[in-house]
Each structure stands twice: as C-alpha cells, then as structure tokens.
Image (cartoon, grey):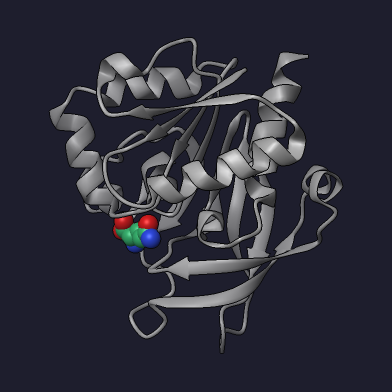
Amino acid sequence: PVNVGILEVQGAFMEHKVSLQKAASSLDLEIHVHGIRTAGDITDSLEGLIIPGGESTTISIYLKRNNMEDVLRKWVLNERHVTWGTCAGMILLAKVTENQKLGGQTSLGVMDMDVSRNFFGRQLQSFEAPVSITDKHFSVVTGYDTFPGVFIRAPAIVKVLSSDVQVLATTRAPDAEDDVIVAAKQGNVITSAFHPELTEDCSWHMYFLQTIILKRT
Ligand code: GLN
C-alpha cells in the first residue's frame, strides 16, 4: 500500500482523507492514511504528505510548539517523499511571504516562491472560479484542462523565484483583469491555493497519488 500522511492540526483534513480514499479507489490503489499530530508521526515509511488549508499562523505556531518544524522540513526536502500543501499549506511551504518581508519567519520555507497570504482581498473572501491547468502531466492523468477551483481567503503565488518551480495552474478571479498562479510544483513538492478536497472531483488527489507512484519507478 501507499502510506500517506495528513497533517491533522487544524482545518480541512477530514475532507482530504475522504477525497484521497476516493482517488485511490479510482486508481485501484491500496492506501493507508495516517493522521500526523506529533514529530514522531513523521516517519520515513510515509511516501506522501498533505498539509491542508486552515489558518497558517495557527498551524505554524502548533508546529513550532511541538518541535515539528525541522523534522517536517527535512522530510519534505527528502527526494523520496511527495508533499502537497493546499491553501494555508501553500503559505507554510513558501520561502517568501508577507510575514518574512516584515522581518518574521517563514514556517517550512521550501518552495522558491513569493506567496501573498490573502491575495484575493476581503471582498472576495470566498469564490469559485475555473482553474486553467498548465501542466501536461496533470491533463494526461485527469483528462482535464480546467478544474472548478474553490477559494477560501486564499493565497496566490505572486512571484516564482526559481526556474525549478513549474507552474501547474492559473486562475482569474471574478472581476480581476489578470491571471494569477494558483498551483505549482518544485521537485516533489506540490502546492495549490484552492481546495480540491471541497469538491466532489478527486482528480487533484489522483494527480498527487500518481506523483507518488511515478517516484517509485
Ligand atoms: N489565508 C489563510 C491563512 O492565512 C489561508 C486560508 C485557507 O487555508 N483556506 O492561513
């Protein structure tokens, strides 16, 4: 089976579990899902890890208090592991955020990108918009070019800081004039600003599991 961890600190972790199970059965794959709450839960037997959405400050304080930050960063940077951070997870993974610009720290800081924490502003706290997939592999796995994106006080990638970062998807918010990057991949670290676990469609979870399987071969 594939061992996948979900960080269960706060936020939408239950929904991720449901979507993962669904994706696994569509792929005819046996998976074990492990809830991650302590540093001891972060083991080498995990092949994949989901960092869910929620509130990034709350999650990063929890990680710090429980001495999980360094262990988690090391795990994520290991080439044999695949990580996927959604929404607040994207903020935790970014090397550059508003917090860091104000002299604070980033949490995990492993992806070369500048992330704006509440990019879509207060009026647009939550919205749905089509996400355009710019990654061929994703389209091949899912057969899709667009995906219904659910955005909840979502961040966005305002700048990619290295050519190692591959843009996976962009979106245009209602009334916005420009497209913005809402999903990316660097090595084995995937991130999305929207919440695929809140839609019926499990194609992003399939993509995540496929990335793990591809790693093995
Ligand atoms: N903007 C939120 C934060 O700062 C993230 C929102 C989400 O994960 N739905 O953490």
Ligand 1 - quadrant of the structure image: bottom left
Left or right of residue 41, residue 144 in this image: right
* Position in image of residue 70 (x %, y %): 30, 20
Asked whether 210 or 89 is in front, the reply is: 210
Task: Let me know if residue 9 appears in the view.
Answer: yes
* Position in image of residue 101 (x %, y %): 29, 52
Asked whether 19 or 37 is in front, the reply is: 19
Q: At x 63% / y 69%, what residue is drawn?
A: 171
Q: Quadrant of residue 148?
A: bottom right
Q: At x 70% / y 28%, what residue is drawn?
A: 29
Q: At x 59% / y 26%, what residue is drawn?
A: 31
* Position in image of residue 62 (x %, y %): 18, 37
Which quarter shows the C terminus? top right
Q: Residue furthest bottom?
A: 175
Left or right of residue 55, residue 1 in this image: right
Q: Residue furthest left?
A: 65
Asked whether 121 or 149 is in front, the reply is: 149
Left or right of residue 184, residue 103 in this image: left
Which quarter shows the N terminus? top right
Question: Count the marks: how many?
Answer: 0
Q: Residue furthest top?
A: 44
- Relative to 117, say whether 127 is above or below: below
Q: Quadrant of residue 108?
A: top left
Task: Let me know if residue 162 appears in the view.
Answer: no
* Position in image of residue 51 (x %, y %): 42, 40
